[in-house]
Image: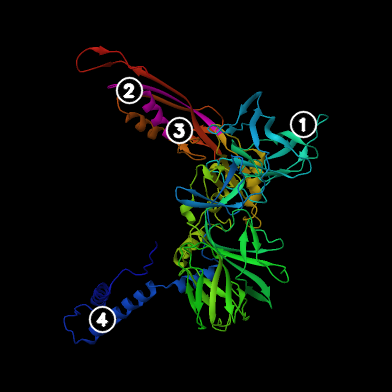
Amino acid sequence: MYSLNLNTTGQEELYERACGRMAQLLPGWSDAIPSDPAVALLELASYLSHVQDREINTLRARHYLAYLKLLGQMPEKLAPARMLAVPGGCVSPWPGMRFEMDGVPFEAASVPYTGPCRVKDVSLAQGGCRRVLRADAPLIFTHETPAALEITFSVPFPPGVPVQLWLELQPEPGRMEPEEWTAPPVQLLAQIETGGPQGGIPCRDGTCGLLRSGYVMFTPPVPFDTLCLEVEGEIEGEPRISAVALYPVVLEQRRTRSQCLDLKAPFRLPPGWGKNWILRFFSPQNGGWREEKHLFVREGLVKGLSGQTPEVVRVAAWEPDFPALYPLRELPMETVRLEECGILPASLRLMVEEDGLWYDCPVCQPEKGLTLLRGCRWDETRQALRFGDGRDFCVPREGRLLVAGCACTLGTGGNGAGGLLVRDGVILRPLAPASGGQDSEDGKTAFFRAAKELERPARAVSLADYEALALRTPGLALARVRAAPAVRLGGAGPGVVVLAKPRSADPLPPLTRWQSEQLSAWLDRFRMIGVPVEVRGPRYCPVEVKLRIQSAGPVSEPALRAAAFRHTDGVTGPLDFGAELPYTTLFSALSAVSGVGTVRALELRALSGCGHRTQEGGIRLEADALPYLARFQVTEDWEVYENGRDDPPVSV
């Protein structure tokens, strides 16, 4: 993906450069005589430099890992994509149930609730009107208060049972993901119908005030079938709720190839577990496991036990096409390569055989200076298990290795998958496409990623640092940021003023109190001691443009307005805080519009006190002002064309 070349010059070019330098130092010198000692030395130096560059440019994986360790970074690990789904049929899924979506396997990682209670209807009451949530129309919150989200359930919810309600919010463009310390802009309060005086129930809000998707949890004291989530405070942005679910099913993009369970009496397997898989049974003995070949499964129960009933029975299962057994030859640094791609290291469960008994074999990184009796490491690059040589793990005994737990994933290949999931009468409707999948990262890619991340400012020193850090404020969506010395904005003494314009549907959005507090708290982490930081919102300066033209052909008003917009607008246009609006530049831009023959008159005027007129007729704004084109007026003079007749002016 990346290439590192410290010197692109070859041996011949280095030699020619050296000869050219020698000719400058010693006029008349030439390399025409090969026996000249200087020629031999230059050839040797150019060759050694070429060899050195080649060795430096050829970095190995261990070099990148060593550099990453110095930077305090590690390569990113393989991670499966995840999605949430709502059951749509009468049959409930079970943990580990596998679904196929366009050939991509997903498994139910968590099924927290299998009862009949489901979300029936969702509506939003705000601004005197009520809107109902539909699959093709999300509920959009505005800034009007009060606002309440009303949710109706299919059956009454029992009292005393914690409610876990998932709110799926569509991500807003430009908004940074809030952190755990981010104060929510609004508070959610649960109201339920009790037949008497209503009382608010405190909620645990995982959405951070409707800034992200998350769980809203509370415990009702009485049964209810209608819930009202009241929104208290000033709503930030325009939250869009696309789905509401009660105890959604968590799905992971993975394919479990083998797994094991430790069962207690009556030794019942979970529904659908290990169906049509190869099974092996073990019972504990002398710190290990003894294989019980006479056990079998009937109607979900492990049968065939004789004598004293063990406390635990381990069941290992793997798919028929998965090679789970490997021989061990008692070799130092023995390697077992698994015939799978995209293995999740956290899913690996190993058992090794020694003298007829099986023992657990951890896959871990032991502490420095500690030698474990059994264990191995997972080699991410080779997709292999590497056993010890006596320094970290003892050399494995001769026997067999059983991969009792293994799952593989596609990583980023599972992101974006969506659609109905159907299997064995179970119907699941995803709330949003799968996301969060991540490919494993090699040392070279991780090194360049870490180097790029280190370029980001970690301390606010320059004005550019303040601007870059402000745009990364968790929970905020900022469209434009400018940092300026405090003295430039009327302050006394040292200090920095950060001007921020929020990203909003409002054409002239003010910086709210919550946004200012979040931005100030974030920048306070990075500012230098003795440098006070002040956060301000923009002042908007309306601009008027009056134009009188003589046309030489058809003139388009949108084209004239667009030309004026590029030189007079900083709200949605290209101009920045404190920009200067030059008269000459605007005059030239309007004259260049198609159909304009001559600009007879041009007037540029600021409609507020934050802009000052220049001698040439332009506008110089104050440092915290943003201009915007508020008025645009065009008048057109008559033009006598070459055909000798007077054509009426085009209406603009």
The kind of residue on which mark 4 rests is Glu
Rendering coords of residue 264 (x, y %): 71, 63
State the residue position of label 2. Answer: 555
Task: Give the CA separation, mark 1 to mark 2.
Answer: 64 Å
Label 3 sits on a secondary structure element that is: helix
Q: Which residues are magenta?
A: 540-567
Quarter containing the C terminus = top left
Image-quadrant location for residue 59: bottom left
In the rendered image of this protein, does residue 333 appear above or below residue 167? below
Residue 193 marker: 1
Task: Give the CA separation, mark 3 to mark 4.
Answer: 63 Å
Image-quadrant location for residue 200: top right
The kind of residue on which mark 2 rests is Val
Rendering coords of residue 121 (x, y %): 64, 31
Please state which of the two labelled residues, at mark 4 or mark 1, is closer to the viewer.
1
State the residue in front, 62 or 501: 62
Q: Is residue 609 visible?
A: yes
